[in-house]
Image: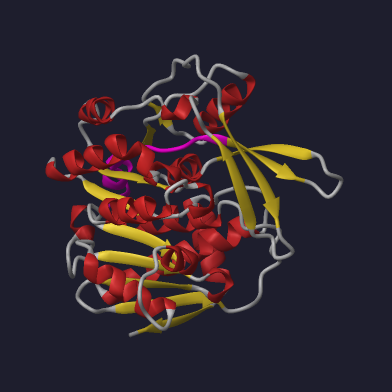
Amino acid sequence: MAMSDFSAAQVAIAGEALIDLIARPDGAFEPCLGGAVYNLSRAISRQGVSTTYLNPFASDRFGRALVSQIQADGVRLAHPQPVAQATSLAVVSLNEQGHPDYAFYREGVADRQVSAEGLNADCAALPDLQCVCTGGLALDARDASVYLPWLVAQRAAGRRVAVDANLRPSVMPDLRAYQVHVQQVLAQADLVKVSDEDLAHLEVPGATPLLQAEALMGRMNADWLALTLGERGAWLLERDGRRWFAREGAPLDVIDTVGAGDSFFAGLLSSLLRHGPGWAQSRGLGDAAAAQALRHAVACASLCVQQRGCVPPSWQQAQDWALAHPAVMVPR
């Protein structure tokens, strides 16, 4: 796909934007800009895709900081005017491996001041819109009247749907309702990303994460499913049975994993978008293009984990990393 055509591609993203209060060894908390969908918006834009974020921000100090960063990364705001509600907060503790554990404070907050009707109206105002994305806390069953009907309407309008499950079961009051709702949302997607932990939380049957991913794909309409395994790499599955695997060929100097999955998904989606509207159709990509898309996504995650917080790479940075660091690649 020509770069001029790629630059015209538009993605609209809806979901949480919040402040991560990250616990430090001295007991203090460091505020960092975050939220899986907010990070995904920044990461996709930094890959060179025209990106619109659909949720509003607060007028408080945290909200202003979130707006400043996302706009610096080139993301267009559907609602640049702030709302009266406060910014969402997440208290984050990191374990010895750098993996985050979250507690959220999200009642009556700015990013939840959305409706399905409003999201659809925002998307209708984007004439070149090709794809809509969500995931993370937007999959909360308590917001089922917002994001699910929006995705249904966007799919009916011919837009591609991409969903990063990125589950947070520990903060959901009704785990069963959450599992059911997540699978209802995933059923609307053309592209799904899950981690091995997501599959465990969804209680998908299978002796290995790959078998679980294949079982989950059998329940959905998606043509593509990406399975991330942390430092053990990632799989890309297509509905027709083709499979690709990639992981870094050498260990990384991991600082933390905040934003790694968001960077991975941004890299994968941006790679697929470069191949035009046919990417979401079965056999829409050849084997080499699919493998390259997966390698690019892994490179994006690798660059992110070597920095503190979510610092998504540009397209060229990820391309350069992949070229300089041979990966373990397995087609199947």
The quadrant of the image that shows the C terminus is: bottom left
- Between 42 and 107, which is closer to the camera in this rendering? 107
* Point 22% across, 39% down: residue: 149
Q: Does residue 159 appear left or right of residue 134 in this picture?
A: left
Residue 113, picture quadrant: top left
Percent x, y for residue 258?
61, 52
Q: Does residue 317 appear left or right of residue 160 in this picture?
A: right
Residue 77, picture quadrant: top left
* Point 37% across, 80% down: residue: 206
Q: Is residue 189 magenta?
A: no
- Between 240 and 205, which is closer to the camera in this rendering? 205
* Point 67% across, 59% down: residue: 306
* Point 46% across, 76% down: residue: 246
Viewer can see residue 49:
no
Residue 190, picture quadrant: bottom left
In the rendered view, would you say 116 is above or below 38? Answer: above
- Between 298 and 92, which is closer to the camera in this rendering? 92
In the rendered view, would you say 230 is above or below 110? Answer: below
Q: Does residue 95 appear left or right of residue 26 in this picture?
A: left
Percent x, y for residue 146?
30, 34
Residues rendered magenta in the picture: 1-18
Percent x, y for residue 180?
31, 55
Percent x, y for residue 66?
56, 29
The quadrant of the image that shows the N terminus is: bottom left
Viewer can see residue 252:
yes
In the rendered view, would you say 124 is above or below 16? Answer: above
